Image: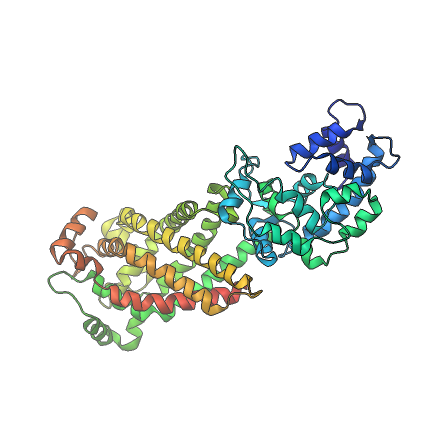
Amino acid sequence: MAGMKSVEEEFRRMDKDGSGSLGRRDIEAGLAERQLPRSRAVVEAFFSHADADGDGRVTMCEFRHFCAERERQLREVYDGMDKSGSGKLTSDDLKRGAQELGVKISSEQLRLLHRRADESEKHGVISFADFRSFLLLLPEVNPPAVFEAFSTTVLVDHAQSECTPPPELGPYRERHAAPHLGSTAAAASSGSSSSSSSQGALSFPLAALPLAPFAALSNLLFPSSEDYDDSRASALASKLYSGCVAGAVSRTVTAPIDRTKMLMQVSSAKSPVRVRDAVQAILSEGGVSAFFRGNSVNVLKIAPETSIKFVAFDQCKTVLADDPGNCTVGERLVAGSAAGALAQAVIYPLEICKTRLAVSAPGIYSGIVHCLRTVVRKEGGAALYQGLGTSIVGIMPYAGIDLTVNSLLKDCVGGFYAEKAQEPGVPAVLACGMLSSTCAMLLTYPLNLVRTRLQASGMPGSTRFLGPIDCVRQTWAGGGLKAFYRGLGPNMLKVLPATSISYAVFDTLSGG
């Protein structure tokens, strides 16, 4: 194994009576602890490999030789499953492997398996140490033998489990069982030697190895904090950078639509501004360049906002979900809502600045810094957070719905393409983003409108509101439910190109 100490620890853990050697009852107990088959055939198969002198006991020396060979076999299987080369296995690795194999395991089945693990460890990856310890006593280490063992123990009905084996398990065994190996019981009764076991383990193409332990290893997805290593830090840095650039590019391209929408939103109910009126008003201010007024602050705010939101979403899933790689819809909603709230709270003063620069007349503010200073000097520092409560209330469901729907759609699309041994193309990724953003916007637009009106409250030409409730009351009085969707048309027009550009840039920079 990794070291002499690890071998001795495993040996002593199974040597319950401290006799210095392992008997059949010790091995049965070890198999039971790992929730693996512990029939007489399985136990005898282990002894045929480990008991070199045939005396019915496995000494420390014999166990050490057995572990050295078994670790080599397990390492090949583990590395084959680790598609990303990160040195860690996640539930995504298991699901991807299942898809490649043609075995359909539902998310609920994976979660049921996860509950058998220690709930105090929720880091979402399988370390090789756990992988090795869990599979150490299997009589054979190859895809059919290992999956055969797991399918008859882990994915079966019992008094405390709702999990049932998918119908594909039978065909899997028929398709992949090797004639010279047969079942685990056959391997044991044939009295195959340790050397033949080794040869059998390598007689399958490496492409088939990744899926061997996938079913049983699902309940080991909570190792130590070692998963926060350099590779994870590098992945997060890549996501931060990609999100910043993608957000900045998409916001710049869609800035004219955004400013048009904002002028329509802050217009009074008595004299609503139509799209054509808003466009003409903006052009009269300063030509085409007037459409980009306030865009610098928009770009400045979108960089940290996008970065915080995506990174926080990942971290919230790690903290909240039993299996971060296989979250439930509820876990995704909570994680997305929390991520959106955190990002909004951090950048909210820039949100105030962006709104005022976009809707103010030329000359009132000379730039971002001047806008912030003017607001603080005239209205106090609290004005930079005016409407924050409403904003967070609005952004939480929006971010929650957007990130949840998007992640669910990408999971479905990924599974569809995996069955064809293909990767989702850019159009498929963009479609997921556009659909999720549209769903979120339609459901949360009224709150967004109230937030925008509160941000512009008191400015020349804008109505002053006493608070969120007063804003809702006046908006309803000015046009009923329809008034809460004023500016939705330009916003819808903005969502499609903005989401498309953002996802395209992000996918290109991050490699998907």
Position of 178 compared to 226: left or right?
right
* Residue 434 location (% of width, % of height): 38, 64
Position of 34 compared to 157: left or right?
right
Colour pattern = rainbow
Q: Residue at x 23, y 64 (%)?
A: 487
Q: Residue at x 53, y 32 (%)?
A: 159
* Residue 401 location (% of width, % of height): 36, 53
User: Quick check: can you spot residue 258?
Assistant: no
User: Quick check: can you spot residue 132?
Assistant: yes
Foreground of the two, 485 or 229: 485
Foreground of the two, 392 or 378: 392
Foreground of the two, 253 or 39: 39
Q: How many marks?
A: 0
Q: Note whether 319 is above or below 503 in the view shown.
A: above
* Residue 120 location (% of width, % of height): 54, 34
Residue furthest right in the image: 53
* Residue 379 location (% of width, % of height): 23, 50
Q: Residue at x 51, y 58 (%)?
A: 239
| Image quadrant in which the N terminus is located | top right
Position of 36 compared to 467: left or right?
right
